[in-house]
Image (cartoon, helix red, strand yellow):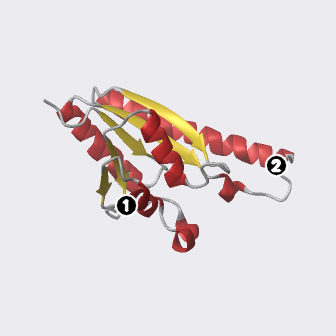
């Protein structure tokens, strides 16, 4: 009997996310589980003085397209490992203002058994002030187990 049936992996294009994808796919294959990938776009990072400007619309369109591309690559990797997968693109908002909040909402909506997350992603300077996504998940994930994958530096 499998312990985990539905895994969630937040992705952001970082090496930490890539390592989490690899671990999650190995675990899913072993447990005969499915994987749900989520990419969250942080609107606070896209804030501009003229949100309705053509430049802002182009930027948001490009960021959405990049997120969809990351999700597509993750689903393709899952297919290569014969692991069933789904995907979602989410955006932070006033109701769920942080990436961690969005990830947990997605996890609850899909009744996942485990969140598999890299320890370091692409949050950069903002994380030093507000806390990293992984740290947010640690503090907020009371009802869903979290597997934190230590991020190894990329090999040269």
Give whichever of 65, 128 is nearer the camera.
128
Which of pointers 2 and 1 lies earlier in the amino acid sequence?
A: 2
Callout count:
2
Q: x, y percentage for residue 10?
A: 44, 46
Q: Is residue 84 left or right of residue 60?
A: left
Quarter containing the C terminus: bottom left
Label 2 SS? helix
Q: Is residue 105 visible?
A: yes
Mark 2 against mark 1, which lies toward the viewer? 1
Identify residue for label 2: 55
Relative vertical location of residue 45 with respect to residue 143 in this rendering, above or below = below
- Residue reaching furthest to the front: 143
On screen, residue 83 above or below 63: above
**Image x and y of residue 43, in percent:** 67, 52
The answer to whether residue 153 is left or right of residue 95 is left
Under tag 1, what secondary structure?
A: loop
Look at the image and tell me whether residue 72 can be seen.
Answer: no
Q: Residue 1 in the image: state x and y as whole percent.
A: 13, 29
| Residue 81 image position (x, y, % from top left) | 27, 30
Residue for point 43% across, 29% down: 86
Quadrant for residue 153, please give it: bottom left
Identify the residue at horizontal 68%, vertical 43% (top origin): 62
Q: Residue at x 64, y 48 (%)?
A: 95
* In this rendering, position of residue 16 left or right of residue 61: left
Tag 1: Cα neighbours inside 10 Å, few (<14), some, or many (≥20)?
A: many
Give yes or no for contact between labels 2 and 1 (Cβ–Cβ under 8 Å): no
Q: Which residue is mark 1?
A: 119
Q: Is residue 63 above or below residue 97?
A: above
Q: Which mark is residue 144?
A: none
Binning the other alpha carbons within 10 Å of mark 2 as few (below 14), some (14 to 19) or many (20 upward) gives: few
User: From mark 2 to mark 1, how far is it between C-alphas?
Assistant: 33 Å
């Amino acid at each position: 009997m499998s312990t985990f049936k539905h895994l969630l992996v937040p992705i952001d294009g970082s090496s930490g996310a890539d390592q989490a994808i690899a671990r999650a796919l190995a675990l899913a294959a072993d447990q005969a589980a499915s994987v749900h990938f989520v990419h969250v776009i942080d609107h606070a990072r896209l804030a501009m003085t003229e949100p309705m400007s053509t430049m802002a619309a182009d930027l948001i369109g490009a960021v959405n397209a990049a997120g969809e591309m990351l999700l597509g690559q993750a689903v393709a990797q899952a297919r290569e490992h014969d692991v069933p997968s789904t995907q979602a693109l989410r955006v932070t908002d006033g109701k769920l203002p942080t990436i961690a909040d969005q990830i947990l909402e997605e996890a609850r909506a899909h009744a996942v058994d485990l969140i598999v997350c890299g320890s370091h992603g692409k949050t950069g300077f903002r994380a030093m002030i507000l806390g990293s996504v992984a740290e947010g998940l640690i503090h907020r994930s009371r009802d869903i187990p979290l597997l934190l994958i230590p991020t190894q530096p990329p090999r040269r």
